[in-house]
Image (cartoon, rainbow, N blue to C red):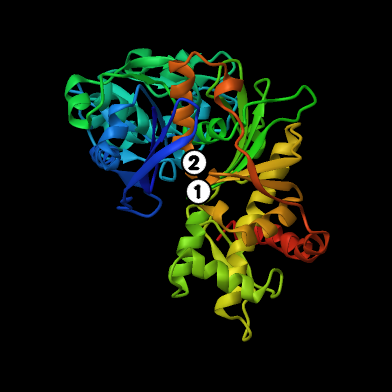
Amino acid sequence: MFLGIDVGTSGVKVVVLDAAGALRAQASAPLSVARPQATWSEQTPDDWWAAVDIAVRLLDAATRLQVTCIGLAGQMHGATLLGADDRPLRPAILWNDGRSFAECEELEAREPRSRAITGNVAMPGFTAPKLAWVRKHEPALFEQIRTVLLPKDYVRLRMTGDKASDLSDSAGTLWLDVAARDWSDAMLAATDLTRAQMPALFEGSEITGRLRAEVAEAWGIDRVPVVAGAGDNAAGAAGVGVIGAKEDGGGDALLSLGTSGVIFVATRDFRPNPARAVHAFCHALPETWHQMAVHLSAAACIDWGAQLTGLDGPAALFAEAEKAGPASGPELFLPYLSGERTPHNDPHVRGGFLRLDNETTRGSLAAAVLEGVAFTHADGLDALREAGTRVEELLVIGGGARSRYWGRILAAALRVRLAYPEGGEVGPALGAAKLARMAALNLSAAEACTRPPVAEVIEPDPALVEALAPKLAKFRAAYAAIRDL
C-alpha cells in the first residue's frame, strides 16, 4: 500500500493506493487560517502536523500496517521559518498573503535578472518576497532563521528528520533557477540567504528519508521510505496523468477548482511568460516543466457566496444558480477576494458585485459568482496561449469538479472541452501516493501516473458561448475600472 499526504490550506487529506494503483482508503482533518491584518494569511506549522497525525490515525489500523512508501503534497509558497532548534520562529506566511507587494519590486531591483533566472514575475504569494518582508519588519527574528521550509516539507521534517524538498514546490519560492533545476545563489543573496538555509532538492519520486521510529510506532507503520512528492498543483497533475507534452506547444492540461483555481499545462521545456503573470515551474517528474495560470479564489468564492446569501453550503448555491440560469441577468461578480495573480498580479484589488438592480435575486447573485470565477479562468487561459501553449482539453479536478452545471459555464467561458476523471475530487494526495508507488515499484512516470477513466465530457455549448461573451467583455472592462480603487 502507498500513502499520499496532502497538506492543504483548509485541511489535510490522506489517501491509500494498493499495488495496482487503486484507491483503497482516504481520510481528512480540517485546518483554519488566521488573518491578523488586512491582506495577511497565516497558519501555525504545528497545526499541520497535528492535522496530519489525526488524518493518518483515522485510517484503519490494518491498512496502515500495509503501507510500504509515503508521498507528500502540499500548499505551495508558505514561508516556514525555523530557528537553530528546528522549531518555528513565527506563524507561517501563506501563499495567499499579500503583505509583501513592495518587497517584490525591491527584490527585482536588487537582482535585475530575477525574471530570467526564475521565469516568473515576483509576486507577494511567492516565498522570497515574504522573507524580504520579514527582513525589513522583523529584523531580530530574521537573524535567527537557520532554515526555510515549505509547508509539506515541515511535515517531512517532523516525519523523518530530513530537510528536503522537491523541485516543483521549490520552483515556487523564487529562489530556484527553474531551467537548471537548482537553487540560484543570486536569488538567495537578494534576500540575504544562502544554500545552507535551504533544504536538499530531489525529483518528486526520489526517496528523501524514512519515518522516524517514534512516528512509525505511533502510526502503526513500519519505518518506510518517504519520497520528495510535489507542490499541490504538480501532485494533482501527476494524480490524473497530466505529465505529457508535445513539440507543437500542446500538452496534457488540467483545471483545478480548489480553494484557489489553477490551469496547469505540462511542457517539454521551460516556457515562461512573466509579463502576464504566468507561472513557469518544474514538474514533479524529471526533465519536465509546466505552466500555470493561478487564481487566488475559486471554490473559495462558492463557499463565500453561499454564506453571504444565507444558503446552506455550495450545493445549495449551485442549485440556486441553476434555477436562475446562466447569463440570465446583468449581474457581474469580480472574484478577487484575496487579490489576483494571473494575469493581473494585483494583491490589492478586491472583489465585488456590479450591475445589480431591483430585479436582482439570490439566484442571480449565485449565477454571477459561478460566471465570475469562470471568466477569471478565461483570462488565465488567454495568458497561457500568449506564451505559445495550445490547450484543447482540460481535466477537471478538485472540490469544484463535483458540479457539472458549473462545468457547462466553465467550458463555454474557456471555449475548451472539459473531461471529468473518476476520482478527480481526490486531488493532490492521489498524486503524492502515485509518486510513492513509482519509487517503491521502480515504475516509469507513464506507468505510475496514469490517467483515470473519464466519467463525463462537457463540450462548449455554442449557444452558451454566445450568451456569455458580452458578460465576459464587461467583466474584463470592470477590472480596469476598479483597479485604482
- Disc 1 is placed on an element classified as loop
Q: Is residue 246 visible?
A: yes
Q: What is the quadrant of the C terminus in the image?
A: bottom right
* Label 2, residues with CA under 10 Å away: few <14, some 14-19, many ≥20: many
Q: What is the quadrant of the N terminus in the image?
A: top left
Where in the figure is residue 429, as x and y percent of width and height?
44, 36
* Label 1, residues with CA under 10 Å away: few <14, some 14-19, many ≥20: many
Q: Is residue 202 visible?
A: no
Total residue callouts: 2
- The residue wearing badge 2 is 427
Foreground tag (1 vs 2): 2
113 is higher (above) or lower (below) than 56: above
- The residue wearing badge 1 is 258
Which is nearer the N-term, disc 1 or disc 2?
1
Q: Nearer the viewer, residue 319 or 255?
A: 319
467 is higher (above) or lower (below) than 373: below
Q: Nearer the viewer, residue 221 or 38?
A: 221
